[in-house]
Image (cartoon, rainbow, N blue to C red):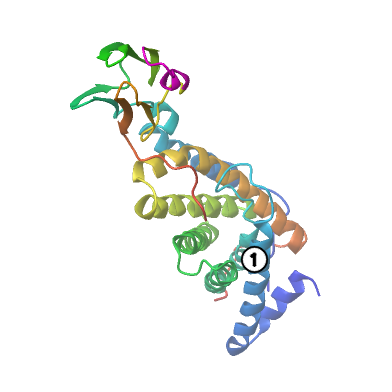
Amino acid sequence: MNFTDFLERFSRAAPEQRAGYIAVMAALAAAVSLAERLIPLPLPGVKPGLANVVALILVAAGFWRAALSVTLLRTAAAAAVTGSLFTPGHLLALGGGCAAVLVMAAVARCRLLRCSLYGVSAAGAWAHTAVQLLIAGLLLVPLQTAVSLGRLLLPLAVGTGLVTAFAASILMGRSPGRRIFQKDRQ
Amino acid sequence: MNRMLPAALRAGDLPLIAVLLLLSLVPGWSGSPGSRGARGLSVTIRHGDEQYRYPLDRPRLIEIRGRDGIFIVRITNSTAAVIKSGCRSGFCLRMGPVSRAGEAIHCIPQRIAIVVAGGDPQFDAVSQ
């Protein structure tokens, strides 16, 4: 069973059964998040963002509330494994992840924008980084320093968002004939 | 499930990405870390009970008569360095220039300390 089939089953599952699917997807996302930490980073704070692939696919499929749940669970699980639960690092991941899901959902639902997965993902990655910088500026470093770092990190976030979208499209399998962002199913 | 992924970019993608990249430049309007330079930084020179403070972004030569002779500090290119000291060890000369807040040069024989202060607190890295 590939991820497309899994998502198909999730979409057909009864509401009370969806929690199990969400838990599996959160575990998958947390595993990807932890594996991603092993990748050498070119710059501090710059990551491919592959952990957001699951949330991106869920948002693209119209399940943004499920994507939000997966993000909450994913960040908590990854933080628990690394011993950083409720630390500023966890708060950064949580805030960034939730902002990304909300922005991706807004872009996905906005018919005026007419974006594909790539646009949605780029917007989400940008919001992810922007909110992380804002939280860092409020909690960790002077706000002006965080804002200045945005000039470097925000354009990179757009690039990593496109990488995430590419990874998601591979995971889902490209389906040229089928449409995305139709009537909300939630 | 009728919503699946498209194979390629759609019409709205490129304008959205362009807007995001433009928005990314907004924080730069207030100045990047590199362009901020030594704004707000100052050099404090302590000599015994006396203390002098100079902005780091204005070049100048400061001459102090220490216990072991003339002691000269040069401020240039947003850095401060000791270029002459009458002390025997010469450690202060070999310290090289200082430019970041918190960095300091001490000359114990001459009883002179040069400390960079002010500006934003610097950090080496942010752990996540």
B100 inside magenta stretch: no
Q: Amino acid at mark 1?
A: Val
Chain of the residue that carries numbered disc 1 in the rendered image: A
x and y percentages locating residue A161 in the rendered image: 61, 50
Q: Alpha-carbon neighbours of circle 1 within 10 Å: few (<14), some, or many (≥20)?
A: many
Residue A9 in sight: yes
Image position of A141 with respect to A55: above or below: above
x and y percentages locating residue A86 in the rendered image: 45, 69
Q: Quadrant of residue B26?
A: top left
Image position of A163 with respect to A179: above or below: above
Magenta span covers which residues?
B86-94
Which quarter of the figure is the N terminus of chain B placed in?
A: bottom right
Q: Secondary structure at mark 1?
A: helix
The furthest residue to the right = A1
Determine which residue is flagged by label 1. Answer: A54
Looking at the image, which residue is at 37% across and 55% down?
Answer: A139
x and y percentages locating residue A173 in the rendered image: 78, 61
Q: Is residue A166 left or right of residue B49?
A: right
The furthest residue to the left = B49
B87 inside magenta stretch: yes
Looking at the image, which residue is at 59% across and 54% down?
Answer: A121
Looking at the image, which residue is at 32% across and 26% down?
Answer: B114
Image position of B67 with respect to B39: above or below: above
Nearer-the-camera pick, A164 or A48: A48
Q: Is residue A66 left or right of residue A13?
A: left
Q: Quadrant of residue B80?
A: top left
Looking at the image, which residue is at 40% across and 31% down?
Answer: B100
Q: Is residue A69 left or right of residue A30?
A: left
Nearer-the-camera pick, B65 or A175: B65
Residue B10 in sight: no
